[in-house]
Every structure is written in C-alpha cells, then in structure tokens.
Image (cartoon, helix red, strand yellow):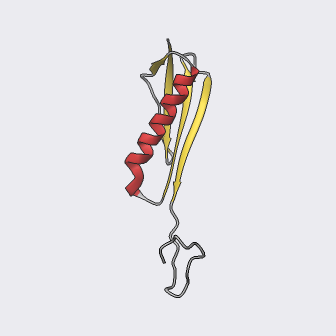
Amino acid sequence: MALYYFDVNDNGVVYPDDQGIECADFPRVKKEAIRALVEMINDSVPDGDHHLIRIKVRQEGGDLVLQAAIRLDVESQRHSGAHKSPDPHAEG
C-alpha cells in the first residue's frame, strides 16, 4: 500500500494533510477523495449559498495524482403569484 496526502481547499482556506492515508491502488484514492468531498459539502450545507471544496491528492514523494472539486451554488428565484410554471408537475 502507498501513502497519499489529501490536501483540502475549503472556500479558499487550505488544510494540508500531514498524516496521509494508505491506499492499495488509484481507484481507492479516487473513491476516498470523492467520499471526503461529499462528506465535507454535506457538513457545510446550511452555511451559505456558495461553497467550493477542492482536494488535491499527492503521493508520498509529492507528485500530484488527482484533483477533485465539488461546488454548491444556490440562487433564489422570485416568482409573482401570476406566473405559472410550464411544468405541470411543479408547484406554483
């Protein structure tokens, strides 16, 4: 197993990984990065309308092997009571 470091950039604040995680292969590295992103965005959901989390994964020697990101953007849409959605399933 090889040691990989998962450095996180959470809305511009960088958290370098100084411990690392042992992974058997690249598919496991990818799975760990995606799992971490989903967990972090889930934890941050009520904190605002815009959130960007990036993970850079590097090998023990420092070589970058993977970058992944997840973005949450919430935009409010104001409707007047007179406007009806063309979607018959939408609540209006």
Q: Residue furthest front?
A: 88
User: Quick one: 16 or 83, which is closer to the camera?
Assistant: 83
Q: Residue furthest bottom?
A: 82
User: Quick one: 18 or 38, which is closer to the camera?
Assistant: 38
Q: Residue 62 at what x, y percent from top left? A: 58, 21
Residue at point 44%, 24% (across, down): 18
- In the rendered view, would you say 32 is above or below 37? above
- In the rendered view, would you say 5 is above or below 71? above
Residue at point 57%, 77% (across, down): 85
Q: Is residue 48 visible?
A: yes
User: Quick one: 13 or 6, which is closer to the camera?
Assistant: 6
- Give the side of residue 44 with respect to residue 64, left or right: left
Residue at point 51%, 35% (across, down): 34
Residue at point 39%, 56% (across, down): 47
Q: Residue 83 at what x, y percent from top left? A: 55, 84
- Give the side of residue 52 with respect to residue 44, left or right: right
Picture quadrant where residue 66 is located: top right
Picture quadrant where residue 19 is located: top left
- In the rendered view, would you say 67 is above or below 42? above
